Every structure is written in C-alpha cells, then in structure tokens.
Amino acid sequence: MAHDTNGAAGKPAIDDEITKELIYSYARGQALEDGVLIDVSATARQLGVKIPVAVTSAVWGRYVKLTPAAIRAGNGEEGRLWDILWMFRWAALRAKDKSELLFQLYMVTDCITPSLVELKALCGPGDECEPVITIMLPDED
C-alpha cells in the first residue's frame, strides 16, 4: 500500500482508491428493537453468564419457538431456550479465550425424535464496545 508522507503533520495519507466511506451501520440496540435479535440475558444470568446474550430471530424461530412436534414431545419455550444456553455455557467454558465457537445439542424440530443441531456463538463488542454474546445459526454472521 502506498502512503503519502506529505500529509498534515507528517502523518501518512491513505490513497483515495482505498478510502472507504461508511454508508450504513446497524447497531445491536436497533436489531433488538426490530426483533432481528432477541435478548435472552435474564435466562443466561440464571446459568451464570454475566454478559448480555441475544439469539437471532432465526434461532428463536427454528429452535425456541414451539413446533407441533415439540408440543407433542412436551417441550416448552423456556426449556428449549434453557437447553440452548446450557450447552452454550458448557462449550464456552471449554473454549476459554475464543471469541467464536460452534456447539451442538439435540432438539426436537420437525419430528418427535430429537436431532443434532449446531449453533454458533460470537462474543464481540456491543454498541458501547461492551462485550456481548450473540447465538446464531452457523451460516449467519
């Protein structure tokens, strides 16, 4: 990368070709307000997770929200959320200094027999640069 050292106060000036303008930013708080993320921090705190946790609407719709099969199997939304957060917690304890991890659990989805599902958790900065966790499908980012 070529730098022009004739900039103000001897600081390098970045070539115009590689200067990018931020066009749009979507804050976590806005995603929570819009329902793109669902705050599950209260339940996570019951499991000892001290920083804010949210799941994506895709995770909620696929694995927390009750399907007809989940109802027939006697599942409840609270229990399904608890299972996700419990397995996340154990995976996070094993993956101490990682900011991204994959974890698996068995969930009743479309049939009464539970199937193995995989989820991804990311720990990153929130709107105020505080640590936050987001649990999502493996292909989400």
Image: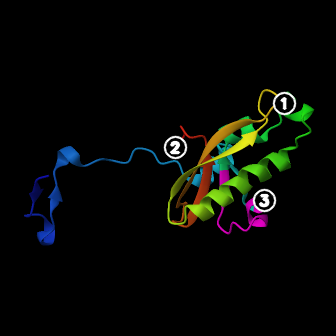
What range is drawn magenta here? 42-54
Seen in the picture, residue 91 relative to 64 is either above or below; the reply is: below
Q: Which comes sooner in the sequence, label 3 or label 2?
A: 3
Dot 2 falls on a residue whose secondary structure is: loop
Dot 1 falls on a residue whose secondary structure is: loop
Dot 3 falls on a residue whose secondary structure is: helix
Q: Is residue 1 left or right of residue 76?
A: left
Seen in the picture, residue 65 relative to 40 is either above or below; the reply is: above
Circle 1: residue type: Ile
> Going 73% across and 61% down the picture, which residue do you hit?
44
Between the C-alphas of marks 3 and 1, the distance is: 25 Å
Between the C-alphas of marks 1 and 2, the distance is: 30 Å
Q: Is residue 66 left or right of residue 48?
A: right
Q: Which residue is mark 2?
A: 141
Circle 2: residue type: Asp
Q: Which residue is mark 1?
A: 112
Q: Which comes sooner in the sequence, label 1 or label 2?
A: 1
Few, some or many residues within 10 Å of mark 1 (<14, 14–19, 20+): some
> Going 66% across and 44% down the picture, which residue do you hit?
34
Mark in front: 1 vs 2: 1
